[in-house]
Amino acid sequence: MIPYGRQSIDQDDIDAVIDVLKSDFLTCGPKVEEFEESLAGYCGAKHAVAVSNGTAALHVAMLAAGLGEGDRVVTSAITFLASANCAEFVGATADFADIDPVTRCVSTETLKSSWKDGVAAAVPVDFAGYPCVTKEMADFVHGKNALVIEDASHAIGGGRDGHKVGGLPWVDMTTFSFHPVKTMTTGEGGAILTNDETLAVRCRRFRSHGMIRGQGVWESSAGVESDTSAVQAGEDIPWLYAMSELGYNYRITDMQCALGLSQLGRLDRFVTRRQEIVARYNASFANVEGLTTPLRAPEAGIRVAWHLYVLQIDFARIQKKRAEFMSSLREQGIGTQVHYIPVNRQPYYRDKYGSELKPCPAADAYYASCLTIPLYPAMTDEDVGRVIHAVKEEVRS
Ligand SMILES: *Cc1c(COP(=O)(O)O)cnc(C)c1O
């Protein structure tokens, strides 16, 4: 079976995890900081905060941004549920912008036309790896007094205009997911990247119960009276910690971070192999009637770290239903998937916001035609050939 996506784990990855298992710390140990530093260094960001998964990264970013009731958060209609749900977690209102049919991501134009009063953050999603956040887009969002929180779960290893995704200087926070189908993995895992020290400190705090350790934390608040006065008297109280905001346990383990460090060392190779496969798919599907390939010639200065290869298929024209197409490929040992059902169409959002939601016609048209075919670095040239042959046969038969 050739699945639509799959992790690449080698002996170094396995050894790295085993080393941690034999060490003193399984969590809250040195690998977490090491991973954060390497990740920040790779992306060219000042701070990285590693968390338990990509959804937690988005939730923590919302909390760090201080978003809550009365705020709106606008994201893409074509994304995984979590890009919108994170707004709802903090009591804000999720809202949706349509996609640009070529990039399949939100654009400055689609954000402008869907913008409503009270939007306090935009969560553009780098769908399939396309790094969609231009400086112009960020300038527009900042001009509305809102933050840019880039959901780059698909886009690690890519970049634009001289910067890597995760380090775009015009983005306030970027989130990653390290789920096994993503471009690099920690099993489960995620991270928030930012150049803003205050946001980074707040992300760390919300990752771990809202807790602050150390001297001084009780100085300004009434609390444990003896501790407060002891601190004021300059005494050393080593056990002190304080919680002034409500946080969670979204910590990541040292085993996971050791795997992440090892994977990060191979990330550029993963991206290159993905690009090779995409180039071969594009060349093979370019002139097939009924098929539209993903963006073949991204603008200058853009490096797309392809996470998914999504074909658009004119099912009416080839006179076949998508479900039939998928099951026929499955019978030939080829896995496919649909990314994604427009999130604004989900019952939760339709029931909650109903007519307040503007239609997203480009997202609907995309959804009617999309099919993700296999893409992962360990695919052999023979695997790729098999997929190309089977898809073409399916379209023509
Ligand atoms: C995978 C993904 C997430 C969530 O990440 P998890 O690690 O699965 O929680 C969020 N947004 C997008 C676009 C994703 O693809």
Image (cartoon, rainbow, N blue to C red):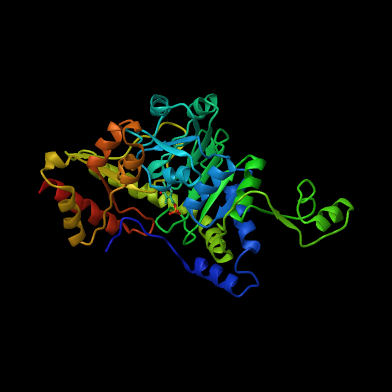
Picture coordinates of residue 141 (x, y %)? 50, 28
Nearest the eye: 241 or 56: 241
Spot occupied by residue 24 in the image (x, y as percentages of width and height): 65, 72
Q: Is residue 117 left or right of residue 366?
A: right
Q: Residue at x 44, y 50 (%)?
A: 271
The quarter holding residue 196 reads top right
The spot of residue 179 in percent (x, y) is 44, 57
- Vertical position of residue 247 compared to residue 256: above or below: above
Which residue is outermost to the right?
Answer: 233
* Total number of numbered discs in the rendering: 0
What residue is drawn where x is 31% and y is 44%? 346
Looking at the figure, which quarter contains the N terminus?
bottom left
Q: Is residue 368 left or right of residue 99?
A: left
Q: Is residue 11 left or right of 110 when viewed as pictured? A: right
Q: Residue at x 27, y 40 (%)?
A: 293
| Residue 173 sits above or below residue 388 on the image | above
Vertical side of 61 occupied by 383: above or below:
below
Given residues 389 and 373, the one toward you in this image is 373
Q: Nearer the viewer, residue 395 or 245?
A: 245
Whether residue 244 is visible here, answered yes or no, is: yes
Q: Is residue 152 visible?
A: no
Asked whether 73 or 110 is in front, the reply is: 73
Taking 59 as reference, is 286 above or below it? above
Image location of residue 362, percent across then percent down: 29, 32
